[in-house]
Image: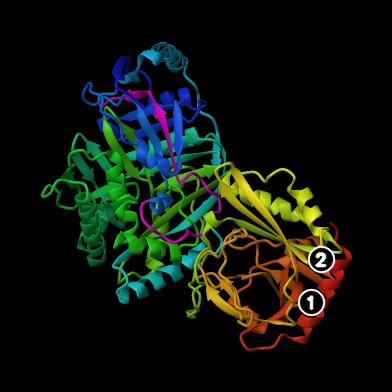
Amino acid sequence: MTGGDAVLSRVPLGTGPSLADALRAVRDDERPFALAGRWAGSRALVGSEPLVVVEGSDALEAVDQAPVGGAAGAVGGGWFGSFGFGLGAAIEALPPPPPRPCPTPLASLGYYDHVLRQDADGCWWFEALATAAREEALDRRLAVLRERLAAGAGPRPFELGALVPARGAAARHLAAVRACVERIAAGELFQANLCLRLEARFRGSAADAFLAAAARLQPAYGAFLGRPGGSILSFSPELFLRRSGDALLTSPIKGTAPRAADPRTAARQRAALLASAKDAAEHVMIVDLARNDLGRVARYGTVSAAARRVEPHPGLWHLVTDVSGRLREETGDSAVLRAAFPPGSVTGAPKVQALKVIGELEGTQRELYTGAIGYASPAAGLELNVAIRTLETSGQRAWMGCGGGIVADSEPQAELREALAKARPIAAALGTRVDTPEPVQAPAPRRLPSWPRRPDPSRGLLETIAVRAGRPVSVDRHLARLRTSAEAVYGLPLPAGLREELHVRAASGPGARLRVLATPAEHGLETVVELGPAAAAPAAVALEPHALAGGLGAHKWLDRPPQPVAAPTPLLVDLDGSVLEASWANVWVLRDGVLATPPADGRLLAGVTRERLLLAGSIGAIASVEAPVGLAELHDAEAILLTSAVRIAVPAAVGAAWPSSAAFGLAGLIRGTLAAGEHP
C-alpha cells in the first residue's frame, strides 16, 4: 500500500489534547481506533478513515510492506486492526469450530495513511505516510483534525449490563476443566487454555466506554476499534509480538493471583504466586512454546528468555517473561505472524493439539478474544497485543471471554474462580459487575460417547420442507430461518425467486419433502432444490446420548454425519448436562402435565414444527413451553417426543426402553392438531 514514493511526514500539535480529546475527535468517522499504553514507545495512537479494508485470511499477507525511513519513534500510519482467534484455522489444519453466536470477521485491518500520535513526553503529532496523490487530502485532513481538537467534544453516555456466563457456560467450564485434566493425564497434551463466555447488553458510545475504563485501568496494551455495527474495547496487559527492525520480542503472561488493595495482603499474594508450583509449571511450558515459535523465524542461536517477573495489574498479579530473538533476513511480518499465531499463552502446549482440545471442550468460538490487536507499520514495524480482557460488541450485544491455563493438577472450581476474577476488574471499570448463578456445580460425572465431529460451515446450509398435496408447508417460516442463517454465517442474501421455485418443484411431481442445499460461492449463495420421498416415519425412536460442548448451534448445517437406518438416534447433550436436540429433530419432554422443549439459546436448531407448537401454546389441555431439560430427567419423564417438519411428531425413549403410552397418544394428537392448521 505504501509504495516506493511514500514519505514520512510529521507536524507537531502541542501537548494540550488528551487521549479523550483525540478519540472523541474521530469517534464518528469510519473505523476509528485508539491504542493506549506502551504502544510504539508512545502514550497513544489514534486514527480513522482508512483508505482500504482487508478482512479474513487475506489480512495475514497485507502486513508485509516495504520499509519507510523516518524519525525514531514515529509511526506515520500502516495497517491497524485485529486478528481473531479463529484465524488460527488458516494457519494450522484444525477441525471446524464450535458454534458462533455472533460471528465477526476472522481478521479485519484498515490501511491508514495518517495517525495522531502522542509521544512519551505528551506531545501530539499529526503523522502521515504521504504520497503525491494524497498530499492535498492530507492537508485538508490535518486542518479538520486541528479544528476538531480545538473545539473539543464532550463524553456521551453508555450502559453495560451485568456480565453473565452464557447459558450453561459456568457448569460446562467445570466439566471441560475436568475433561482436560483427564486428557493431560492420558498424555494427550501438557496444557490447554480453556475459556468461557460472559454476555451482556450494551447501549451508547463504545468509544466513551473505552475511555472511561482505560482511565481507571491504565492498560499496558489497551485498544479501541470501531467497526460497522460494533466495537472492540481491549484492556490487555500482554504483548504478543513486537518487531522493530530485526529485533523480535514476545512477553507471555501465564500465572495469575489476586492482588488486594491492602499492600500487606497484596505482598503475601505476590509471594504466594512466586511460590506456586502450579503457576510455575504453566509459565515454564508457555515460555518454552514462545521460544519455539520465535525460533521458527529467528536467526539460529538468537532466541533467549529473560528471568520471569511478577507484574501488578488491576486486581491481579501476573507472571511475565520476555522472550527475544533476531529475525532472519528476507522474512516478513506475515511469516512472523504465521509462526506465532494464535498466542501460546492463550492456547497451550503442544499448540496444535491444545487448539483441537479447545475446539472440542469450549462451547462457543472465541471471535476476536485471545487473538491479537495492533498495527503493522512500514515506519515503526509490527506490534500486537494478546486480545484478553477484551469486550466485543455487535449492535446491543456484548461479550467477553475469560479463562486460564489447565495443567495436570488444576481443580475445576479454582479455575472457574480464577477466570471470573480476571473479568471483574474490567467489569468494574465499565461500571458493571460479573454475575454468576450460585452455587455453580459441575454435572454428575457420566461418560457419554462424543458426537462424531462438528459440522464444517463451509459446506453450506440445509433446509427440509414438508410437501403435502403438492404444496410446501410453512414455506415462509423455512425461508426466514434459511435467510437468517445465510446472512449470519456468510453475509449473503438468498437468491431471488427461491420461494417461487419451491412452489413449482413441489407441484412438479410426487414427493413428500423438499431439500434446499445452500452453499457459498464467489458470486453469492448457490441453492439447489431437490424433491423426493420422505423416509418412512418410525413407530418409535431409541435415543443414544452423545456429548458435544455447545451443541451444533442455531443453524441447520448441510454437513451432518450420516446416520444408519437401524441405529439409535443420537441425542446431543452439552457438557453441563443439558439436553439439546436429536440429530434430526427437536426434543420434547412431558413432565407434570407440561410439554417442555430446551430453549433456543444458540446451542440448538429451532425447528419449524417446534415453533408452531410453541406458538400454539398448548396441545389439548397440555401447555407447550420452553424450559431447560437435564439428561437425568429423561428417565423419569411421562413422555419423550421428537418433532420435525416432515415427520411432525414421533414417540421416543432413551436406550432400550420403549416409549410410554402417553408418548404415542401425544404424538398422534400433535400430528392431528398441526396437520389441521397447515398452510403453504
The image quadrant that residue 128 belongs to is: top left
Q: Which residue is mark 1?
A: 667
Find residue 253 and report its horizontal and vertical position in percent: 28, 52
Q: Nearer the viewer, residue 116 or 584?
A: 584
Q: Which mark is residue 510?
A: 2
Task: State which quarter of the image contains the N terminus.
Answer: top left
- In the image, is residue 523 part of the stretch drawn in magenta? no
- In the image, is residue 92 part of the stretch drawn in magenta? yes
Disc 1 residue crowd, few under 14, some 14–19, many 20+, Cα 10 Å = many
Which amino acid, mark 1?
Ala
Query: In this rendering, would 490 be left or right of 291?
Result: right
Q: Magenta span covers which residues?
A: 91-120
Q: Nearer the viewer, residue 89 or 211?
A: 89
The residue depicted at 23 percent of the width and 64 percent of the height is 281
Residue 648 higher or lower than 251, as above or below:
below
Which amino acid, mark 2?
Pro
Query: In this rendering, would 492 be left or right of 272?
Result: right
Residue 55 higher or lower than 4, as above or below:
below
Q: What's the distance in space between the residues labelled 2 and 1, CA to CA? A: 26 Å
The residue depicted at 50 percent of the width and 79 percent of the height is 448
SS assignment at label 1:
helix
Task: State which quarter of the image contains the C terminus.
Answer: bottom right
